[in-house]
Amino acid sequence: RAITRRHFGRTMRLFAPLYLSNECVNNCKYCGFSRDNPILRVTLTIEQVVREARHLVAQGFRNILLVAGEHPRFVSDGYLDECIRAIRDFVPTIGIEVGPMEAPEYAQMVQAGAEGLVVYQETYDRALYAEMHTAGPKRDFDWRLACPERGYEGGFRRIGIGALFGLSDWRLEALRLAAHLEHLYRQCWKASFTVAFPRLRPAAGGFTPLTGFPDWALVQTLCAFRQCFPEVGIVVSTREPAKLRDALAPLGVTSMSAGSHTEPGGYTGAGTDDLHLTVRGRRVDLNDKADDARAEGQFGIADTRSPAAVASMLSAQGLDPVWKDWDPAILTPLSHSSGT
C-alpha cells in the first residue's frame, strides 16, 4: 500500500470496455467468442459505436477500451480506425484490445487517436497454449508474445499485458508474466505499463478451469508485482466479485473497470436488429429470434455494480476515482501569433 501511495497517490483510474464485435476466426477452448460456439453474433456499425460511447461518457467515463474478436472480414484495421476517429473528439483516452497486428497498422491506430494497447498472452506455457488454441492466427505463440513490442514501435504510449489465470499453474504463470514485463521495461522504456491477472469466468462453451487461483493467491500475486514493479499500473476488472474488489482496491490496484458489459451493444441494446450466427466464416441469418435476444458476451461479469456505486465505494475508502487523466491537447503545440 505504501509503495502504491508513493507512486500513484490515492488515485484509481476508472475505465469501461466497449465491445465492437464478437465475431472471431480463432478457436480458443476457454473463450465465449470461439468460432465454433453457436452464439448470436454482431458487429456494431460506426453509428452504434458512437451511441455506446456516448452512453459511457454520460456515466462519467473518459477512458474507453475498444474490444473485439479477431476476424479480418468483420473487424478490419480500417473499421477500427473509423471507430477511433468517430469517438476521439469526446473520449480523450482510447485503448484497443483486438487481434495482434503489424507495427504500421498500430501506427495507423495511434494516428487515428488511440493511445493504449492491451494484449494478454493468455498462458506463457507453450505446450498448453497450443492445446488451448486449436485453430486460427492466435495459434502463433511468438506472434502474440511480440505484440506489445510492435505496439510500442507503432507509437502506443500505454501498454497492458497479462495472463489468464486458471489455465496453467498460477505460480509459474506469474513468474513468466513478470519476466515478460521486465523484458518490456528494458525494450520499451518510453512506455508506461499495466498488468492484470484475470481469472477464468463462465462463458459460452462451458470450459472448466484447469487449475485453481484462489483469492489468497491473487492477493499474493498482486502484492508481489507491486513490490517488484513499483511503477506498474495494476488492473482489476469486473471479472472479480464486488467484495473482493473492495478489499483489493487499497492494496496496490491503480485501475478498475466498472459497470461493464462484454457483449457488443451491451450498454444501449445497439445491434440487436442484426443478430446472426456465423458458420464456417459465413453469416447465417436467423429465421426467428426472441424479442429480448442479445449478442453473446465474452464471459460473465461478477461485479455488476453501476459506475457510480464503484466510485462511491472508492471514495468511502479514501481513494480518488479518476475518470479522466489525459487529453490529446497536452501534445498539441501552442500556436504563437507573429511578433509575440
Image: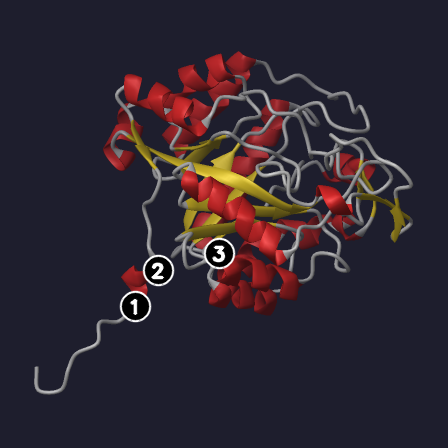
Residue placed under numbered mark 3 in the picture: 87
Q: Where is residue 220 in the image (x, y as percent from the top left)?
A: 47, 19
Residue under the point 69% across and 34% down: 297
Q: In this view, does 323 lie to the left or right of 111?
A: left
Query: Which element carries disc 1, helix, strand or loop?
Result: loop
Query: Which element carries disc 3, helix, strand or loop?
Result: helix
Sequence-wise, which precedes: disc 3 or disc 2? 3
Q: Is residue 19 left or right of residue 253?
A: right
Q: Quadrant of residue 147?
A: bottom right
Residue placed under numbered mark 1 in the picture: 332
Query: Residue furthest toward the bottom?
Result: 339
Q: Where is residue 313 in the image (x, y as percent from the top left)?
A: 36, 19
Q: Which residue type carries mark 2?
A: Pro
Residue closest to the eye, 163 or 115: 115
Residue 97 vs 6, above or below: the answer is: below
Q: Do the residues labelled 1 and 2 touch (CB within 8 Å)?
A: yes
Distance of mark 3 from mark 2, alpha carbons? Answer: 13 Å
Where does the C terminus fall, quadrant-wise? bottom left
Q: Which residue type carries mark 1?
A: Thr
Residue placed under numbered mark 2 in the picture: 328
Local crowd at mark 2 within 10 Å, few (<14), some, or many (≥20)? some
Query: Residue furthest toward the front?
Result: 291
Residue under the point 72% across and 48% down: 141
Local crowd at mark 3 within 10 Å, few (<14), some, or many (≥20)? many
